[in-house]
Image (tube, rainbow, N blue to C red):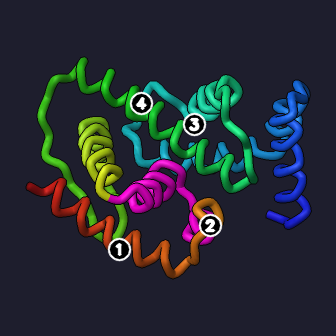
């Protein structure tokens, strides 16, 4: 994404902060493709008969973003960080609904290279990951945000570094630590 486009998104977010009602519509034109990319990334690992589609995930997240009162948008990176958290919440809520219908127990598979879950076990696994991610958040909030942005938001190390205002090497180091902690917790 070009620097000028990043600046324009930040400018629109600031206009939104200042009460510009048209800012949300202008913002959507700039962020829609990136939100769809994130949603496609998330949904590509879902089961084939999943009732939530990437477009619906984007629209639901954007509606929630639009309803977010009290959020003072700082930058493009801040916006996408919040969007990844909302997508996580939406997918977790959807997984809870699916798991309550299914009421089955599946083992959780977790790769230390990436968080890679078999499609049939994804709903139960999302719930388990959400639970341990909440525990990680109470121990190390930054590591929890890194996992959230990477797993649920599909953000790159550079994008995460920008969002959290830390170095890319720190993101890599924190990701490695969080990944090992999650692996241990999910395989107990």
Indicate the position of residue 20 as horizontal and vertical percent values. 90, 29
> Secondary structure under badge 4?
loop
* Number of the front mark, 2 or 4: 2
Quarter of the image that includes the N terminus: bottom right
Alpha-carbon span between mark 2 and mark 1: 18 Å
Secondary structure category for the residue under label 1: helix
Q: Which mark is residue 50?
A: 4
Q: Residues within 10 Å of mark 3 (few under 14, many from 20)?
A: some
Q: Which residue is mark 1?
A: 176
CA distance for labels 2 and 4: 35 Å
Residue under pointer 2: 165
Q: Residue furthest bottom?
A: 169
Assess whether mark 4 and mark 2 are in contact (beta carbons under 8 angstroms).
no
In-image side of 47 versus 135 (left or right):
right
Using a 10 Å C-alpha cutoff, classify the residue at mark 1 as few (fewer than 14 neighbours), some (14 to 19) or many (20 or more): some
Q: Earlier in the sequence, mark 2 or mark 1?
A: 2
Residue at left offset 25%, top offset 69%: 180
The range drawn in magenta is: 140-161
- Residue at position x 58%, y 62% in the image: 164
Residue 73 spot, x, y in % from top left: 73, 44
Of labels 2 and 3, earlier in sequence is 3
In the image, which disc is placed on residue 54? 3
């Amino acid at each position: 994404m070009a620097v000028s486009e990043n600046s324009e998104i930040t400018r629109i977010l600031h206009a939104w902060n200042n009460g510009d009602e048209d800012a949300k519509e202008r913002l959507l034109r700039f962020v829609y493709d990136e939100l769809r990319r994130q949603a496609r990334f998330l949904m590509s690992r879902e089961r084939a008969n999943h009732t939530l589609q990437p477009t619906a995930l984007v629209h639901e997240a954007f509606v929630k973003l639009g309803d977010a009162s009290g959020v003072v948008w700082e930058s493009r990176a801040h916006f996408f960080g919040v969007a990844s958290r909302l997508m996580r919440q939406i997918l977790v809520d959807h997984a809870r609904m699916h798991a309550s219908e299914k009421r089955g127990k599946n083992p959780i598979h977790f790769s230390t290279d990436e968080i890679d879950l078999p499609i049939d076990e994804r709903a139960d696994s999302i719930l388990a990951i959400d639970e341990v991610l909440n525990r990680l958040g109470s121990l190390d909030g930054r590591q929890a945000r890194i996992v959230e942005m990477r797993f649920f938001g599909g953000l790159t190390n550079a994008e995460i570094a920008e969002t959290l205002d830390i170095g890319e090497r720190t993101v890599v180091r924190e990701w490695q630590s969080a990944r090992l902690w999650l692996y241990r917790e999910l395989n107990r």
